[in-house]
Image (cartoon, rainbow, N blue to C red):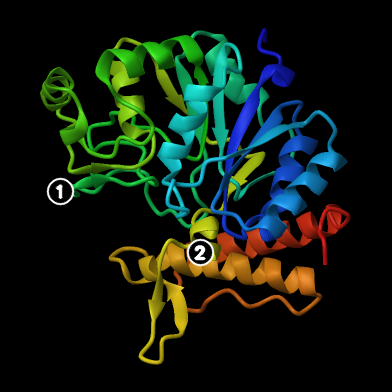
Amino acid sequence: MTIAESSLVFNVVWTGNVFDHLRIFAASQLDHSAARLRFLVNACPDDQLAAMERFAERYPDRVVEMIDVTAADGSMARHGDCLDRVLACRDDGEHFCLIDPDIFARGPFLPRLLGHVDRGAGAVTSGRGVWSQTVVIPAGHPGVNGEYFYTQDGFLFGAPHFAVYRRGPLDETRERWGVGFGTGSARHLPDEAQRRLAAAGLDYWLYDTGKLVNAFLQLTGYELVHEEEPMMQHIGGVAHYLAPTRRIVDDAGNDGEPDWSEWRGMTDRFESARFSAGVLRALVAGDPVPSVPSSLDADLTDRLVELRDDLVRLVDLYAEVIER
């Protein structure tokens, strides 16, 4: 291995008040790697900024900086737009890295993943959510959601949750095809890129963060690898549950659950995110942890039971990081 973990800076997008609940996840990432973190602050209140600064003081030289990536109107910017912004203003050397805030590490999680990049791959991704039942785009589905990594015939779109890119191939791909992490529609691409995408049979209605970058990386001639790393666990949807862009408002004008809880196909993601958030809140408050929802199938129930045990250990291990 020639890639030094300490040379890597992982960009983490923090939204709203999620740092209160997920800072222990960042602590586990630092504990089980030599990599550094950059905090991208996205519509976070002042108390969260202060908490991030105190966290950085606990880990000297490991949190390199905090950059405000909030939209110009003060609203929460899209994930991909945040990554494009930091790409435009920062150069971390030979690699560009990202990791979701609701990923925690059980042990050293980088060596095997970095091995793919070390051997010449343009990028490696990882991070299937605990709730995800399939990583293959369903037949006839109009978009490439974040949780879908492969097409029906095996083309790899990869994951937007964890990634390490070689900066050279990434920049070449972005410049050649006019694509960015925030590009969510082929209609926003130059004509040549639209034709190339259609010719490859990859023309969908919508694309989640980084999906088009990953597609064109391969169409440019570079290899993309996806591998699940057992020492790394992505929950999925927790940040969107804790800090949604919109909530359901009842007749009395009171905010309820995130609006995405009513979207088609979101039941498992929503229930898993709500359960995980409830477990974290209970553990921090010293209250009994909630039971796994009874409406889920046996396989997902087993995964959430294991996740609950992981969260109990995590809160105990990083108790000093939590500010009660």
Q: Position of residue 101 (x, y in %)?
A: 60, 47
Which residue occupies the foreground of this view, 176 or 265? Answer: 176
Query: Mark 1 — residue?
Result: 140
What residue is drawn where x is 68% and y is 60%? Answer: 21
| Residue 71 against residue 258 in the figure, above or below | above
| Residue 219 against residue 22 in the figure, above or below | above
142 sits left or right of 176 in the view = left
- Tag in front: 2 or 1: 2
Q: CA distance from mark 2 to mark 1?
A: 28 Å
Which residue occupies the foreground of this view, 143 or 82? Answer: 82
293 sits left or right of 81 in the view = right
- What's under tag 1, amino acid-wise? Gly
What residue is drawn where x is 69% and y is 33%? Answer: 65
What residue is drawn where x is 71% and y is 59%? Answer: 47
* Mark found first going from the N terminus, 2 or 1: 1
Q: Position of residue 119 (x, y in %)?
A: 54, 9
Q: Which mark is residue 241?
A: 2
Q: Position of residue 217 (x, y in %)?
A: 34, 18
Q: Please tell me in which quadrant of the rendered image residue 323 appears.
A: bottom right
- What's under tag 2, amino acid-wise? Tyr
85 sits left or right of 324 in the view = left
Q: Please tell me in which quadrant of the rendered image residue 93 appears.
A: top right
